[in-house]
Amino acid sequence: MDSQGVSAPVCVSVAPFRQFIVKVHGRCNLACRYCYLYEGPDRTYRDRPAATPPDVLERAAYRIGEHAAAHGLTAVSLVLHGGEPLLAGVDTLARFTTRVRRSVPRTCTVHATVQTNATLLTARRVGVLARHGISVGISLDGGLPAHNARRVDHSGRPSWPAAVRGARLLADHHPDAYAGVLTVVDPVTDPVVVYESLLALRPPALDLLLPHGNWSAPPPHIEPETEGKDGPRPVRTPYGDWLCAVFDRWWLGRRKETRVRLFEECIALLAGLPAATESLGLAPFDAVVVETDGSIEQVDSLKSAYDGASRTGLDVFRHGFDEALRHPGVAARQAGVAALGARCRACPLLAVCGGGHYAHRYRAGEGFANPSVYCLDLQRFIRHVARRLAAATATAATRTAAASASDRSPAGPDVHGGDTP
């Protein structure tokens, strides 16, 4: 491992990138007080252009098409990101998305999404995005003003009034372009209140994310670790408890109100099905970032570990994405079990947890071959979901057995019906 504690590369069969996160603007109109991107240890954004120049966008589109053709991809995800991507102008987003679609083979579908804080959404902008087949994902802390008190602009003014107008505009007039809402878990909030407040914004899907933190910079409300016979353990599981409460509310709602990606992925993994999420499972991670200066980087979450953690030294002018696949950091993200420490490899929840989010495993001087700083929270959540599934399966089996017994009765299935008195 190097001086920053980055693990040595692991030899694996490399999967192509399928998700391309392009920074169309490197600044934000908000100054959220907890933002790991601008308030965390990484400072690389300071030396990059705010707005992505046209030649970078042109070259990024070419490289995406090149990669899709080389690997015979039939679908790719294009995420227009920032900063706040709408600062680049909605017409720029539309032109770039069109350019990417023309660059990939005709047999490849481009699923485009812009991830925004929703404060700059207007009727015209939403209309342009919808016409160009660009879905809109919204980042919020909850569906009430109090939940978003830390999401303020650079003058300290609340962003909620503008954000909720944008969300409702999308839900009312372009629901087909509404990708959903992304919310970072805050265990201080009432989980059910947060969930139900978000339902009021009518999102077709929710992403619930754990705040970025690691063993050297623990997330809020994770108490200092204590040494036990099995290694370091946090004292409580506030994030796991929060997720369990929301899961129960979602489960009792019969999962019809909205999709919750983390819950669906956990259920799929428990059932032995494939799932693709950065937070759970062992599937190879397939995302790459293009920065505003054309740099090819690993995903932004790594910037919460240390300054420059996401750098690869590559750029779209001189390198294709295949060269990024050979970067040691990317290889480690695709190594699955081989990249995990002994504690994770011995854990019975390994196939579901997968070690947790890669960035959350970091410890200065040791790299990323550690359990997640949320290890016990994830155990709490996964075991809770497993119990709910087991109970539901047992209930379904009982009902099936009862129905089968009824079918075999002398009176047949219509014992209480028919014309016989």
Image (cartoon, helix red, strand yellow):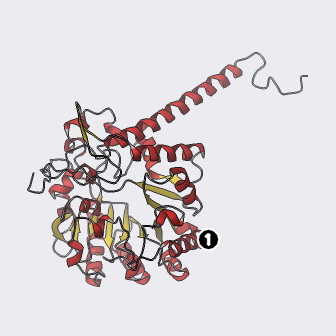
Q: In the rendered image, which residue does mark 1 sit on? A: 172
Choose between 248 and 242: the one closer to the eye: 242
Residue type at mark 1 is Asp
Q: Is residue 99 left or right of residue 366?
A: right
Q: Is residue 38 above or below residue 309?
A: below
Image quarter where the C terminus lies is: top right
Q: Is residue 41 left or right of residue 246?
A: left
Q: State the residue at coordinates (83%, 27%).
A: 417
Q: State the residue at coordinates (36%, 41%).
A: 236
Instruction: Locate residue 73, reporting x and y percent.
Output: 33, 60
Instruction: Locate residue 66, reporting x and y percent.
Output: 26, 69
Q: Residue furthest right?
A: 421
Instruction: Locate residue 368, reporting x and y percent.
Output: 20, 49
Q: Is residue 376 left or right of residue 399?
A: left
Dot 1 falls on a residue whose secondary structure is: helix
Q: State the residue at coordinates (61%, 70%).
A: 172
Q: State the residue at coordinates (27%, 76%).
A: 292
Q: Is residue 219 above or below residue 420?
A: below
Instruction: Locate residue 111, reporting x and y percent.
Output: 42, 65
Q: Is residue 389 left or right of residue 297?
A: right
